[in-house]
Image (cartoon, rainbow, N blue to C red):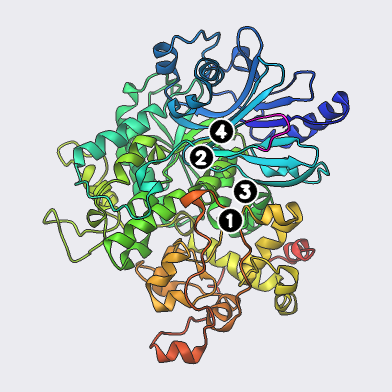
């Protein structure tokens, strides 16, 4: 994983443009601290690369890369897990052992259709100079695991970058947007890139499709194992992020149990043990759970701690790196952990994102009205990951030059999981399909690895309730952020929120606080249009809020797993005063229109009535949301911190 930047078909003096490219590319240096390079063709086309060296860390793996005669040049960010197979099957004349080299060589041999051959997480830009005028191609992986943004100039120039911070305060760029996942584009100078979808499985493209495939637990187990093993490909030290929850624990167990089978993987540990990493406030559920899993698996475990004050200190930097006002609760601990891991010399980690979306692992899935709607919500959640958990996992770790790989979003894993009969995924705590365990969230995954003759995990871990990362690192962090925001944002400021933010108006002081920081770093409509609709109950999509009347009429909702009412700690759930007010009688500002790219971007629909009153809730028998004071010690608020954020 690295940072890439491209300026194509620019107008102006080449030397001046090169200095601009160097400056803008340097904004990505946190993604690629190992080396920087810029290539130009003499026709005002530039490719820049900020390298994080993971495969072939020698100079042979430096980018931008060229083919043998120098007529095709390219930059890549990501990992191509099947690059050895592609080299052999297609007779590619590679001069390095870098996985990125196959991108340009496959393009040279097959043209734009080559992208379908790639198995991995990637974005790329190619300049083909074989004709009289250069031809350009860019592409992004199937799920948008690697980030990419595209900008447009009035002079018909095109700008591409791994992060949109490269486009800020650049007068030549008139508009920019997300480069959609699973798409590529192919264009010539003077044309505007036209996105073409290359990843088009039926589960994603056919809205009427409801799969009927039965579950084969052995197949599920082997497919997930293979996905983990291929992601152990690395020439540098690596480890696993271990929260102690089901998904990260399974990834850890597979890596520990089968890592000797991994190909092209550096075994850097002196004692052969896998390294695992966790973080949380002292006493947090995740820490104890992760320690128990690490002890069971015999990993070399590293446990780190933070305080609510340290987390709040980090929020501005996290918003800057995240390029979103969503996912901050989970991103802050991940950002802090990545810094600790990077300091140990580790460059790559595996992470557990993706299983909750494909299998309906969030607690609100218990409330799905039927199997068909369960499946549609799983599709919505999975197809939008590039703006949510995947974005957070990538940018929070790459802020410190640490690459996170996500086995549950492997193409083969997705093809299997998203074509299973959703009836097998539906939660029913009264049912016990195996005669022992309740049919809880992610039952399929749990049962696939329920192998008592050769266990992957202890019984109590394999069958433990879902705990969202931002909650599991310590409830005091989530509740403290809410309470802190209530303190630093005055009622007078908040009352004018519709004037300050007429589009995507924040409905709570927490989101006003986060949105204010986002606006500081990323002003303008283009930036706002990259952000999805954030209304949610326990990480649901906005559409799923129609499942229950008491959800449907909430303006903001809350992403905490405790908000769904299913969690064991739901009774202790903290609702801030502004959150309560938004959910009982606050007006909702009109949603800004967004440009979408197929089903993956269809999630901006507002559902149900948002004019909710206490009387209306009483008529439906719904309990009013309550405002609760933060528990003692949840988040101290030193005067210096309050002064620090007042400027927003």
Q: Earlier in the sequence, mark 2 or mark 4?
A: 4
Q: Residues within 10 Å of mark 2 (few under 14, many from 20)?
A: many
Mark 4 vs mark 1, foreground winner is 4
User: On the picture, is 147 further left or further right than 197?
Assistant: right
Which quadrant does the C terminus fall into?
bottom right
Mark 2 lies on residue: 145
Q: Earlier in the sequence, mark 1 or mark 2?
A: 2
Looking at this view, is 103 or 59 the one in front?
103
- Marks 1 and 3: in contact by CB < 8 Å? yes
Q: Residues within 10 Å of mark 4 (few under 14, many from 20)?
A: many
The secondary element bearing badge 2 is classed as loop
Magenta stretch: dominant secondary structure: loop
Q: Earlier in the sequence, mark 4 or mark 3?
A: 4
Task: Give the residue at x 35% y 44%.
Answer: 202
Mark 3 lies on residue: 322
Q: Earlier in the sequence, mark 4 or mark 1?
A: 4
Looking at this view, is 242 or 504 the one in front?
504
Alpha carbon distance from label 1 to label 2: 18 Å
Mark 4 vs mark 3, foreground winner is 4
Mark 1 lies on residue: 328
Alpha carbon distance from label 2 to label 4: 12 Å
Q: Which residues are magenta?
A: 187-192
Alpha carbon distance from label 3 to label 1: 8 Å
Question: Is residue 384 shown in magenta?
Answer: no
Mark 4 lies on residue: 139
């Amino acid at each position: 994983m690295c940072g890439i930047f491209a300026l194509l078909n620019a107008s102006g003096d080449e030397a001046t443009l090169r200095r601009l490219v160097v400056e803008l590319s340097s904004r990505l240096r946190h993604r690629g601290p190992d080396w920087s390079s810029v290539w130009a063709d003499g026709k005002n086309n530039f490719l820049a690369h900020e390298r994080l060296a993971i495969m072939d860390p020698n100079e042979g793996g430096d980018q931008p890369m060229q083919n043998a005669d120098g007529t095709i040049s390219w930059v890549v960010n990501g990992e191509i897990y099947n690059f050895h197979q592609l080299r052999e099957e297609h007779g590619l004349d590679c001069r390095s052992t870098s996985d990125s080299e196959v991108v340009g060589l496959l393009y040279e041999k097959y043209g734009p259709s080559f992208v379908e051959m790639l198995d991995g997480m990637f974005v790329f830009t190619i300049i083909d100079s074989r004709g009289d005028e250069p031809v350009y191609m860019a592409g992004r992986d199937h799920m948008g695991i690697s980030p990419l943004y595209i900008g447009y100039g009035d002079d018909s120039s095109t700008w591409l970058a791994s992060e949109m911070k490269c486009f800020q305060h650049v007068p030549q760029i008139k508009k920019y947007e997300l480069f959609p996942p699973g798409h590529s584009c192919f264009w010539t100078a003077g044309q505007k890139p036209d996105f073409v979808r290359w990843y088009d499985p039926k589960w994603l493209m056919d809205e009427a499709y409801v799969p009927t495939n039965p579950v084969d637990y052995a197949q599920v187990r082997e497919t997930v194992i293979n996905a983990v093993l291929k992601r152990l490909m690395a020439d540098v030290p690596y480890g696993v992020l271990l929260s102690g929850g089901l998904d990260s624990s399974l990834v850890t167990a597979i890596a520990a149990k089968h890592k000797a089978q991994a190909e092209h993987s550096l075994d850097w540990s002196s004692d052969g043990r896998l390294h695992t990493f966790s973080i949380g406030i002292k006493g947090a559920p995740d820490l104890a759970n992760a320690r128990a899993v690490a002890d069971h698996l015999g990993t070399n475990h590293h446990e780190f701690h933070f305080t609510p004050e340290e987390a709040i200190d980090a929020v501005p930097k996290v918003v800057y790196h995240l390029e979103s006002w969503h996912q901050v609760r989970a991103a802050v601990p991940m950002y802090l952990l990545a810094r600790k891991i990077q300091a140990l010399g580790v460059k790559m980690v595996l992470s557990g994102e993706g299983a909750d979306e494909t299998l309906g692992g969030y607690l609100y899935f218990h409330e799905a009205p039927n199997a068909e709607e369960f499946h549609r919500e799983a599709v919505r959640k999975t197809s939008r990951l590039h703006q949510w958990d995947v974005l957070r996992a990538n940018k929070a770790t790459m802020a410190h030059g640490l690459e996170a790989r996500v086995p549950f979003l492997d193409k083969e894993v997705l093809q299997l999981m998203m074509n299973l009969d959703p009836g097998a995924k539906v939660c029913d705590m009264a049912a016990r399909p195996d005669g022992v365990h309740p049919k809880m969230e992610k039952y399929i995954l749990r049962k696939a690895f329920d192998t008592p003759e050769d266990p992957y995990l202890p019984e109590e871990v394999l069958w433990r309730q879902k705990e969202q990362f931002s909650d599991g690192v310590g409830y005091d962090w989530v509740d403290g952020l809410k309470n802190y925001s209530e303190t630093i944002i005055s009622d007078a400021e908040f009352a004018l929120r519709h004037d300050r933010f007429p589009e995507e108006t924040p409905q709570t002081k927490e989101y006003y606080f986060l949105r204010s920081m986002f606006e500081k770093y990323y002003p303008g409509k283009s930036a706002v249009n990259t952000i999805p609709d954030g209304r949610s109950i326990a990480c649901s999509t906005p559409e799923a809020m129609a499942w229950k009347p008491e959800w449907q009429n909430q303006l903001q909702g809350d992403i905490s797993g405790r908000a769904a009412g299913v969690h064991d700690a739901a009774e202790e759930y903290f609702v801030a005063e502004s959150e309560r007010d938004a959910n009982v009688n606050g007006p909702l500002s009109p949603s800004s229109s967004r440009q979408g790219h197929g089903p993956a971007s269809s999630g901006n629909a507002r559902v149900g009535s948002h004019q909710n009153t206490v009387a209306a809730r009483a008529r439906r028998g719904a309990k009013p949301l309550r405002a609760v004071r933060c528990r003692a010690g949840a988040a101290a608020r030193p005067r210096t911190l309050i002064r620090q954020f007042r400027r927003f």
